[in-house]
Image (cartoon, rainbow, N blue to C red):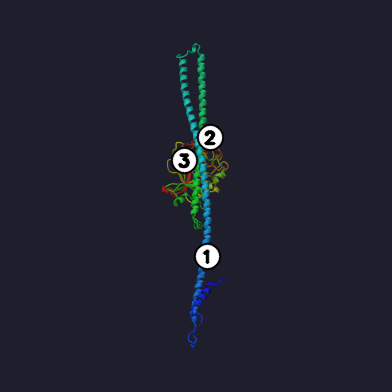
Amino acid sequence: MKVPLANLLCITVLASSGTSFPMERRGTAAGKEKRVQYAPWDDVNVLAHGLLQLGQGLKEHVDKTKGQMRDITIKMKVLNVTVSELGKLTQRLQEDSEALKAKAQNLEESESLVLNKSTDLQEKTEELLRDRQKDHERMNKLEEKVDGMMQGEGLEVGKGNNSDARIIQWMLEAQNKRIDDLVERIKQQQEKLDKQNIRIRTLQNQIHMKNERSSLKRKEDDIQLNTSSEQRDSPVAMACDCHELFLRGETSSGLYTIQPSDSQPFEVFCEMTPEGGWTVIQRRQDGSVDFDKLWQAYQTGFGSLSGEFWLGLEKIHSVSKSGNYILKVQFSDWRDESQSITYPFHLNGEERNYSLHILERPAGNLESSLSTEASGVPFSTRDKDNDLKNDLNCAKQLSGGWWFSNCGRANLNGRYFVTPAPKQRHQRKQGVFWKTWHGRYYPLKTTTMMIAPAEIENKS
């Protein structure tokens, strides 16, 4: 049976007090008067009251300590669970990293094999070219010999040596046929080399994309681990474009997530320059992505942000509708010479077929290849003909989707041709071109389209 602590203390003190109860004092001498002494009752009350308060304080302290112990126990359990989850996450990240390393190693081995094959093909091509040169030299000697014979310096044709002339003529025809065969084989080898080069660039892009995704995933995991629950309860609003990210301190080009007003978050590639951040909306560089798509694909976007891609008309509209924006177009040729042109622009929404309005003519020596129609030029694809050519579907005749006015001024979403370009003009006009730079039938090597607030132009 449990006794309350305060009562126990009272009993102990009262029992040990010599004046708590009356005591009889007996003397040794007979006849002495017996006397009884009592402790003052007020002192006993004060002592008891103090002991009760002390016991109550001790009880409250014990209860408080028990509550604190329970809280500590709960926190320790939560900490143990968090440590266990972190351990599992770390192990999973290590496994993913090892898998990515293995894939990268396989891709590097494949690339090495392709490079070796390309080297072998190049050596064979050089050998064929040397053989061709030797054949040309032999043919020249034979032609000189035939000329000498015809002039009387060698065999006399008029004296019964027609058979020798026919033999030489046959040899010349055989040599010409062999030369033609060698030229055809060289063309085939060149085509194989072009395909191998495309394959090599594709593999390199895949390796680059794998590395970027791995780096991005590690960065996101680090952010999640380092972000506390209080920070998650009050998140910071996302940037509406790449220039806002630049103003927040981001200076490295790469993949970022933005959220324009009245739009869902989506990922973009930001080109960071000393003047500010540009949101890239299109890139062509190796022909790894087919741009001959339908309206739905051009509306939502396609391709890889780390390689070739089209961001999407709806996303471009959501970024640029919030203010004054400029469009920058960059391109390069196969001599690695580059050019760029900048426009202030406005892009309508889906209800106006994403019509492009060029607000001013660009400054500089390079003329514009985009229409400056006051009403704007709607976007057009082969399944949705919105171009300004009444008797022709420009997207069908050319290739890809674009703001076509009269089918012939520009198309940066056309077919990508690896040199040499096709000889037929009707094929070359389907390529990636900008008419005011190198003309209508010159296929460009690279193109990049990006947008930014107009204020960035004042800083450049």
Which mark is nearer the camera, 2 or 1?
1
User: Can residue 409 be seen in this snapshot?
Assistant: no
User: Can residue 141 be seen in this snapshot?
Assistant: yes
Q: Which residue is mark 2?
A: 427
Residue at disc 3, secondary structure: strand
Which mark is nearer the camera, 1 or 3?
1
Q: Quadrant of the N terminus?
A: bottom right
Badge 1: residue crowd in 10 Å (few <14, some 14–19, many ≥20): few
Disc ID at residue 433 = none
* Image position of 451 with respect to 61: above or below: above
Q: Amino acid at mark 3?
A: Phe
Residue 253 percent coordinates (x, y)? 46, 46
Q: Amino acid at mark 1?
A: Gly
Residue at disc 1, secondary structure: helix
* Image position of 59 with respect to 450: above or below: below
Residue 18 percent coordinates (x, y)? 49, 79
Residue at the farthest top position: 159
Q: Could you tell me if the residues under marks 3 and 2 are in contact, i.e. CB atoms within 8 Å?
A: no
Residue shown at 50% from the left, 15% from the top: 164
Residue 452 percent coordinates (x, y)? 46, 48
Q: Earlier in the sequence, mark 3 or mark 2?
A: 3
* Image position of 147 with respect to 308: above or below: above
Alpha carbons under labels 2 and 1: distance apart = 82 Å
Residue at disc 2, secondary structure: helix
Q: Amino acid at mark 2?
A: Gln
Residue 183 percent coordinates (x, y)? 50, 27
Q: Which residue is mark 1?
A: 67
- Left or right position of 1 against 458: right
Residue shown at 50% from the left, 74% from the top: 53
Q: Which residue is mark 3?
A: 331
Residue shown at 47% from the left, 26% from the top: 130
